[in-house]
Image (cartoon, rainbow, N blue to C red):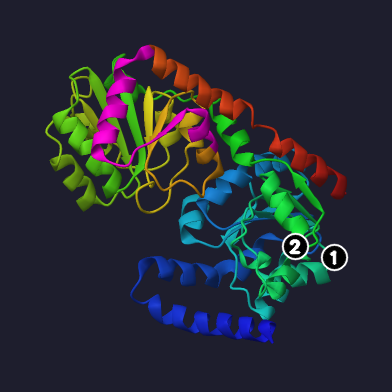
Amino acid sequence: MMYFLYNLIVSIARFFLQIIARFNKKIKLFVEGRKDTFQNLIENISKTDKVIWIHCASLGEFEQGRPIIEKIRKEYSNHKIVLTFFSPSGYEVRKNYDEVDVVCYLPLDTKSNAIKFIDLVHPEIAIFVKYEFWPNILKELKRKSVETILVSGIFRKSQSFFRPFGSWMRNSLQNFSHFFVQDINSEKLLASIGFHNVTVSGDTRFDRVYEITKQNNHLDYIETFKQQQLTFVAGSTWKEDEELIIDYINNKASEDEKFIIAPHNIDAKEISELKNSLNKKTVLFSDKENQDLKNSQVFIIDTIGILTKIYSYADIAYVGGGFKTGLHNILEPATFGIPIIIGPEYDKFREAVELVNEGGCFVVYSKEEFDGQLKELFTDADDRIKKGEITKNFISQNIGATNIILDYINSRIK
């Protein structure tokens, strides 16, 4: 009965998405992008190809899966790699990712789509990153005896799998050959419902951000702007975050303190509003060639794709999302060994909880707390360095998940 209802809901959702797409840009990308999925696969995957399939819900999951993808690319050059996304925010950013052979949307999880998709991809192994449990697709993978694993998985007691009414969703988990989870709590939860094919491997994002420190992170324009002065970098900020930062810059900042702000939303109107709200000399990334970077105090990054490199120049970092939308990635600044400030909504992010407990990450609830914490980090060099060492060690102590998972993959791929 539940399976019938699920398929009915998916069909109804598909109908309404077609209508909503006419009025919503993101939904339009979601709908229109899927029209090319099957043709893309027909043109790029032949029946004789050996295929490895990796699925990521969105961009965050892609970053978790990326270390695995890039190791697979090196070790299995004779295989084709198919990368799928559920969300436009992942697909649109990574549709030209050159470490794989095909990037496409995952089709909606109808029974017919699942059969057609798995038939075209015919993967030797299917890798799901962190989330995404699609009953029809998982059922078809099981029917075709495809090795199916979950990597960097995280489970919580509130999920339907662990509720009295969740037996139908628990059935979907039976289609996985193995679970690689981030923590012992996830292992225990799975064991409580009868799943013991589980390895606590940790989070592959640690491997990803650790590798970032080894790449070339040099940016001439950031060096020109920084000028050896203490620099605060605020990444993936929203309006609620920016209110704190704006108030500090306008009213509390010393002349020798520099600020880089990389908003999550780079809409031109909102960027203009942000710039106009600041009373210090401010330059935009999009206009950097025409401005005096050296003598500016604030640098607004109105572009995407360079934040990880910018963090390498930070003395103190702020990661946005902790006041409303959900905390963004704190591991990217942590890997460079700098103290981090965040908002109060962080309890769903294991790495944030642990780093707060260890003392490398600070939670602020108000402008007053933000002002006090930031000024203390700016003025107390010994404390700033000590807290930075905590974040750096936190990363180094948690790397290794990718190799654990690759060992398993190597034992399954011919």
Asked if residue 307 shows in the view, the reply is yes
Quick one: quadrant of the N terminus? bottom right
Residue at point 57%, 50% (across, down): 61
Q: Quadrant of residue 183?
A: top right
> Residue 265: percent from the left, percent from the top?
32, 50
Q: Pick the residue in front: 47 or 268.
A: 268
Q: In the rendered view, does 195 fall on the left or right side of 62?
A: right
Q: In the rendered view, does 240 fall on the left or right side of 95?
A: left
- Identify the element where label 2 is drawn: loop
- Is residue 46 magenta-colored? no
**Amino acid carrying mark 1 in the image:** Ser
Residue at point 78%, 65% (across, down): 175
Query: Measured along the vertical axis of the image, is residue 211 above or below residue 407?
Result: above
Determine which residue is flagged by label 2.
46
Residue bounds of the magenta highlight? 354-381
Determine which residue is flagged by label 1.
145
What is the magenta segment's predominant secondary structure?
helix
> Residue 69: percent from the left, percent from the top?
66, 44
**Amino acid carrying mark 2 in the image:** Ser
Q: In the rendered view, does 172 fall on the left or right side of 37?
A: right
- Is residue 363 magenta-colored? yes
Q: Pick the residue in front: 192 or 230.
A: 192
State how many labels appear: 2
Q: Pick the residue in front: 331 or 91.
A: 331
